Image (cartoon, grey):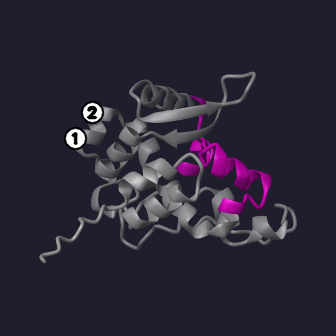
Amino acid sequence: MVLILSVTPFLREVIEGKELMGCKPDNCPPLGHKPIHKKEGVRKTPRRSARAMALGRHAADILAAVLAEIEALRQLGIALEAGASRRLAQLRDLGIPYRPDDWFGGPLNWARRKAYSRAAARLEGAGLLLRITEPNRDRVTHVQLTAAGLRRALRLVGPRADLAAVAEGLGRTTWGKELAAGLTPRRRPESRNP
């Protein structure tokens, strides 16, 4: 799979074992910003398909970013299922952390942050995304794809999506087990001739 998006710094720390070792940002070596799904010679900004344009640029970007994060969950293994830390437990139980700054390359200005926030609200209104907010505020902390959102994200990303990684990543979460079951190919029963 080749996605242009990078994995958030939190997931990179967990994948590299720093979260499990109890490293804090001040005593861990720097990670650098190297996406795990990037190949040399790939355009930084992919061309938009007609489906992406109909959905809206920011909404399509969010769907692709969440799908990339779900693929990365595969690498967390048993640590995610066990909820080895508070952040891993939240990832397992609540969804993908909503971090447009990390998804789209650094600090976003107010206008872009607001555009992504509105796009996430539109996606939720269309039934493609579920936004998890803080209890006493309307601040989005985590997002989850719905079944329709997962289908739309897979169509949007196309053959670059690794279905096995997506299914395994979703299967490691409490919120994505049903979605993962829908992704696994069903085997046809073999007919027996007596």
Residue 182: image location, x then y, percent: 37, 52
Disc 1 crowd rating (10 Å Cα; few below 14, some 14-19, many 20+) is: few
Instruction: Please provide percent x and percent y for residue 9.
Output: 66, 58
Q: Amino acid at mark 2?
A: Ala
Instruction: Name the residue type under label 1.
Output: Ala
On residue 15, the disc is: none
Residue extent of the magenta highlight:
81-110
Residue 190 on image: x %, y %: 21, 71
Q: Is residue 115 magenta?
A: no
Residue at the farthest bottom position: 194
Residue located at (71% from left, 55% from top): 88
Quarter residue 111 falls in = top right
187 or 54, which is in the foreground?
A: 187
Q: Is residue 138 left or right of residue 38?
A: right
Q: Position of residue 97 (x, y in %)?
A: 63, 45
Quadrant in which the C terminus appears:
bottom left
Residue 130 seen: yes
Left or right: 96, with 84 as reference point:
left
Residue indicated by mark 1: 50
- The reply to whether residue 65 is in sight is no
Furthest residue toward front: 194
* Residue at the spot of label 2: 54
Determine whether label 2 and label 1 are within 8 Å by CB. yes
Q: Residue visible at 36% across and 39% down?
A: 148
Above or below, 59 against 23 in this view is: above
* Secondary structure of residue under mark 2: helix
Looking at the image, which is closer to me, 30 or 97?
97
Q: Which residue is at the front of the view, 20 or 107?
A: 20
Q: Residues within 10 Å of mark 2 (few under 14, many from 20)?
A: few
Secondary element at image label 1: helix
> Where's the N terminus, which quadrant?
bottom left
